[in-house]
Image (cartoon, coloured by chain):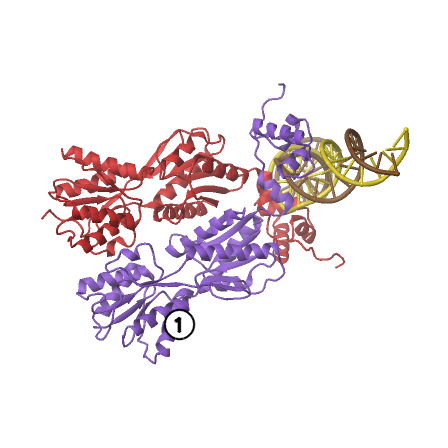
Chain colours: A red, B purple, C yellow, D brown
DNA sequence: AGCAAGACTGTGAACGCTAACAACGCTTAG
DNA sequence: CTAAGCGTTGTTAGCGTTCACAGTCTTGCT
């Protein structure tokens, strides 16, 4: 009772003293080493409990040279897609016994991604997953610091970093083909912003379906994912003669289009059919309920982690793998044969 | 050239050797200590550059006993509210030169929150912000491990942990008063799930406004925030005679209500007026555009960080502060006088 | 010239943990 | 009866930083 109670939280040595053993024995108990006498173990455990001891993970990571922490580099985690992916990542990592440290970039350029990864490397993360939906982000992966396992999700294939993503082209193709099969002459497109790989993939799929059917591809209207930009595209489309089917690159813009059509007196799907992309939770409750392409973002995140863990556990084969999650097409009430 | 190139990334000692100085001088350069000769500084900098040296933040944190990292405990980061808040937190923390480590709980109970905070404490985070929109989470804050600065956001007042949140009561009151002022006899309510503090606050504000006007409060319908639950409430409401105004506890449910009304042939705002809560990006493009209460989630996150940093820099006055962000009322086209 | 004050740099010891090895006591076989 | 073997524990040395202190080398002043 002579020593003043430590002002700092207890450390391993304190526990050792309290239990009458060496710090190393405490460490052994904590790490489930086999050769500790049961009685000693319980004594140590009791001391830990009594002192409220918590092991310092930083010191542990410093000594072992790995942290059981995975780094995530993301961009605008408030968007539906990235948010869902990051959520999947967190859950999968936790299940595998890893923790997650997130760096969320405001603007996503080569330098930002590099800095983020450098920071994470400084934290001794065991691996990194980069949410790289934009071309600029994906290309930043080309010159990753070697030595640290990394995967990209929601991105294109660049360098030899493994990638997990939803097959945008297939989804867009299916959406377009669906409209064509209903009898529409051609399908218009409201695309996402230029730098986004997903936007590009959807344009590509849409073009491919059109080309397959031998139909002309109208000039796409370019949006920025927001309902507002969809609204503007919708106004323009409503006034363009001959438009009977529109494939919109995401559901939020589709809502904007829908709103513009309502204001302009264009009935959906009576006069114009509409297909979206993503299947946000709201889409089923639009008026009319939106036919769309569902992406399982959480699955993308989970698979990203699975791939990353495989790389961590069996390094070497850093083959530029590519894992594709198939989208699923959800038919609701916004599509019908042309008038 | 005799030494084999280190298999591990270079450490401070390597830089020191390369620059012909002591490791301590390298440290000084890195930490911008004043007393380093300019020439020495550039020599060290050059060596750092040449070797591609990156300081090990773990070791630094271990030595300094703080990590310039803030911990975030959150729940379902895929929801609009928490996602927005977490985004605000990340941005504000980054601006202040802090990093962010996130633990995202699947279910939010006392034990989960405790574990999360313990883990973060083990990471030597300098502070913790808990996104605690549920009563169970908020009450978990009552027995926080002392010593580590913490604030709660989006939560109620419990224990003496400072809280930042949007004034739910005021928002709900305003929404209800708006409907009353339009001439509606009374206002019905579709509430959020039981355990949520925000749901409770909105019920309270709604009740208060009704009581003030001396109007009876109908039994609220309870939803779970999802469009689907709103849809069900909407069907029920459409068939209840005498309903002319509904205040829905969030925009997603309001969308569901809207959909049900459309299906039942109930015109909005012709026969029933509708007010939502949150102002999600989609709300302005509903049919009709939704009158709603906007919450600035990012501001909540930013203020949470601001409060936390104040606590970190000036410990001691852990007074149970309470910072309230005012909501703002956005009138669109879903409200009108009763028929 | 002499000497203190200041600038600059180096040395050793933490920080709290794990890894590697050494040492101890007890059993068991030769 | 002794040596080897095993289970169990303690000791020492890192992991890569920073901190406290002790030096050394300039200056500028008397």
Looking at the image, residue A251 lies above or below residue B235: above
Chain containing the residue with disc 1: B
The answer to whether residue B2 is left or right of residue A75 is right
Horizontal side, residue B172 vs residue A48: left or right:
left
On screen, residue A180 above or below A14:
above
Residue at x-position 49% and y-position 57% = B303
Q: In this view, does B185 lie above or below A1?
A: below
- Secondary element at image label 1: helix
Q: Tell me which corner region of the image, top left, top right, bottom left or bottom right, holds residue A47.
A: bottom right
Q: State the image coordinates of residue A223 (x, y, percent, origin top left).
A: 28, 44
- Is residue B14 visible in this depiction of the protein? no
Please tell me how crowded label 1 is: few (under 14), some (14-19), or many (20+) other residues with Cα within 10 Å: some
Return the residue found at the far left. Answer: A339
Closer-to-camera residue (B270/A209) = B270
Which of the image's four quarters has the N terminus of chain A? Answer: bottom right
Residue furthest toward the top? B1
Residue that carries the numbered disc 1 in the rendered image: B204
Displayed quadrant of residue B79: bottom left
Q: Where is residue D13 in the image (x, y as percent from the top left)?
A: 69, 34
The x and y percentages for residue A171 are 25, 40
Where's residue B30, x and y in %?
A: 62, 37
Residue A168 shown left or right of residue B139 in the figure: left
Q: Quadrant of residue B62?
A: top right
Q: Farthest bottom residue?
A: B214
> Does residue B333 appear anywhere in the picture?
yes
Image height of B203 relative to B164, above or below = below
């Amino acid at each position: 009772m002579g020593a003043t109670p430590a002002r700092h939280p207890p450390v391993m040595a304190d526990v050792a003293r309290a239990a009458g053993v060496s710090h190393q024995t405490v460490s052994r108990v904590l790490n489930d080493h086999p050769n500790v006498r049961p009685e000693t173990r319980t004594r140590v455990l009791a001391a830990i409990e009594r002192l409220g001891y918590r092991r310092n993970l930083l010191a542990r990571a410093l000594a072992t040279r790995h942290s059981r922490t995975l780094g995530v580099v993301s961009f605008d985690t408030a968007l539906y897609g990235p948010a869902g992916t990051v959520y999947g990542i967190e859950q999968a990592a936790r299940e595998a016994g890893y923790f997650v440290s997130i760096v969320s970039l405001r603007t996503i350029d080569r330098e930002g991604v590099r800095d983020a990864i450098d920071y994470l490397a400084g934290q001794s993360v065991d691996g990194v997953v980069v949410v790289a939906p934009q071309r600029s982000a994906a290309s930043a992966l080309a010159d990753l610091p070697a030595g640290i396992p990394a995967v990209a999700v929601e991105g294109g294939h660049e360098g030899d970093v493994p990638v997990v993503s939803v097959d945008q082209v297939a989804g867009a193709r299916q959406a377009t083909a669906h409209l064509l099969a209903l009898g529409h002459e051609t399908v218009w497109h409201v695309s996402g912003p230029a730098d986004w790989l997903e936007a590009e993939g959807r344009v590509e799929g849409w073009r491919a379906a059109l080309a397959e059917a031998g139909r002309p591809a109208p000039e796409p209207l370019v949006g920025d994912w927001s309902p507002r930009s969809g609204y503007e595209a919708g106004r323009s489309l409503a006034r363009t003669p001959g438009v009977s089917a529109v494939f919109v690159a995401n559901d939020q813009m589709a809502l904007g289009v829908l709103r513009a059509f309502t204001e302009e007196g264009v009935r959906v799907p009576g006069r114009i059919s509409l297909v979206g992309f993503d299947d946000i939770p709201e889409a089923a409750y639009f008026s009319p309920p939106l036919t769309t392409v569902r992406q399982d973002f959480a699955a993308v995140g989970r698979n990203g982690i699975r791939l990353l863990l495989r790389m961590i556990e069996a390094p070497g084969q850093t083959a530029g793998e590519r894992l594709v999650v198939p989208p699923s097409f959800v038919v609701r009430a916004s599509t019908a044969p042309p008038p």
